[in-house]
Image: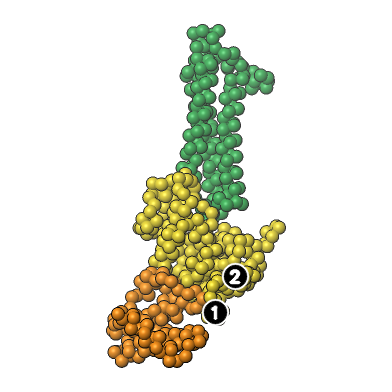
Chain colours: A orange, B yellow, C green
Amino acid sequence: MQFDDRAPIYTQIMDLIKRRIAVGELKVGQQLPSVRDFAQQVVVNPNTVQKAYLELEREGYVGTQRGMGTFVSGDRGTVDLLRQGLARDIMERYVAGMRLLGYGPEEIAAMAAEAARKETK
Amino acid sequence: MSMLVQIGSLTKRYVTTTALSDVTLELPEGHIMGLLGPNGSGKTTLMKILAGLVSPTSGSVLVDGVAPGVETKAVVSFLPDVNHLDRWMSVGEAGDFYADFYTDFDRKRFEELLDIMRLTVGQKIGSLSKGMVEKARLSLVFSRRARLYVLDEPFGGLDPLARSQVLDALVANFRTDCSMMVSTQMIAEVERFFDDVVFLDSGRVILSGEAEELRTRRGASIEGIYREAYGHVETRKV
Amino acid sequence: MWKLVRYELRGRRLLYTIGLIIMGALTLYQATRFIGMRENPAQSAPVSMGVPLTMAFFWVLFYVAMTVINIVTYTQDLYGDTGYLVFGLPLRGTAILGSRILLLVVDTLMTLLGGMTSVIVLACLAPGLAQQIRPWVGRFLLTGDY
């Protein structure tokens, strides 16, 4: 798996897992792969995966049960919130990029709506 | 977290040159450390000292609390950057040799690794291509359940496929009760495996720290930091 | 240490084989020069001190070659790039040195036994040679004259 080595890898792993939760690939209550398995899948230092898991736990997205593994915490509501949060991040980047090109709010919204319509067809 | 390797003010002087000068570093248990620097910066000398093949001129070196010697050789698995196997040996005989002298050699793991690397026990070392010899040597080194793995340029002479095989083996081999010190020129491909990095230049440590922390602090990859540290212009596209 | 000696010897298998084949060939060659001696004295090559001296010379050469290889290998291992395998082993330096000294002992025994064997073979293949040589050897040992 490709990572941007210019930023800490553990945050990128966290983002990856958050995305999977938001999209529903990882369901609430589902167990995350073991640190070792995940490290082998993604081909990264297991300590980095461990750090990502710990941070995710600190932020409340997952919980670890001793001897059992790491599971996705929360409920439907928290997942929706996560989804919205990630969507907002994408939108902020989109808007910032469009503004750099010189587009105004109305044009940005219109172009976004048109692109979205095209996508769903 | 205990320190598996503790090096303090290590200096190694030869008649005409000083290979290492006042080197201090620590490698915690369960970590993978990248030893980086241009050719001639002292990486190989440092690794040979850890392997007990070269003795320091001054300073202290402790591997699992013990100075390098007969005891540490039994727990340190060293991969030199040149072929260290006799050409008349077959892969299987090399395995037998290791098994005979190293009590931590795991035959089963050796066979598994040979399988992954597509090598057979009957092949003579002298008949193998450069890349295959590398893979054979790596298989031997990793089949030992050592406390410290010291790998000097383990990726030299390997094609991209073999490199990924080795990296996969590295991750699969990872245990929290051992540590690895790896020197490599292929920083970009390997930096995601380093917990810690140490940059050497002309025998001195010019930078060291945790990889992730350096990335955050410098906003750059380890390779980018390397280029900066050794005076190269950053040419990566943003 | 003994384990190491075993490995070193195995590694030298080729060297020993070649060396002993050469020495065997030399011995047989010498034998052919004197083989018809008893039946037809005129046919054989001249007998002199040269015969045992040549044989001794080649056996000494054999011994020197093996010893030089022994020492050079050890020195190269110690100061060069070739010693990683042996010097990385959890063995004391004295044990490694000891194994090389043991190799020297093996070489010595091999040379002595080989030398005696070649003398016996020569004596068997060229009967009469021993009788012819004896006076020469006797004179050499007493006066150093050959």
Query: Seen in the image, is C33 located left or right of residue A116?
Result: right
Number of the label disc, if any, that sits on residue B227: 2
Q: Is there any visible trace of residue C112 in the rendered image?
A: yes
Residue B57 image position (x, y, % from top left)? 65, 63
User: Where B100 sits versus C139, above or below?
Assistant: below
In the image, what residue type sits under mark 1? Gly
In the image, what residue type sits under mark 2? Arg
Residue at mark 1: chain = B
User: Where C109 sits versus A49, above or below?
Assistant: above
Residue projecting furthest to the right: B16
Q: Is there any visible trace of residue A64 in the rendered image?
A: no
Residue B115 image position (x, y, % from top left)? 36, 55
Figure quadrant of the C terminus of chain C: top right
Residue wearing tag 1: B219
Instruction: Between residue C15 and residue B229, name the one nearer to us.
Output: B229
Determine the secondary structure under disc 1.
loop
Residue at mark 2: chain = B
x 38%, y 69%: residue: A40
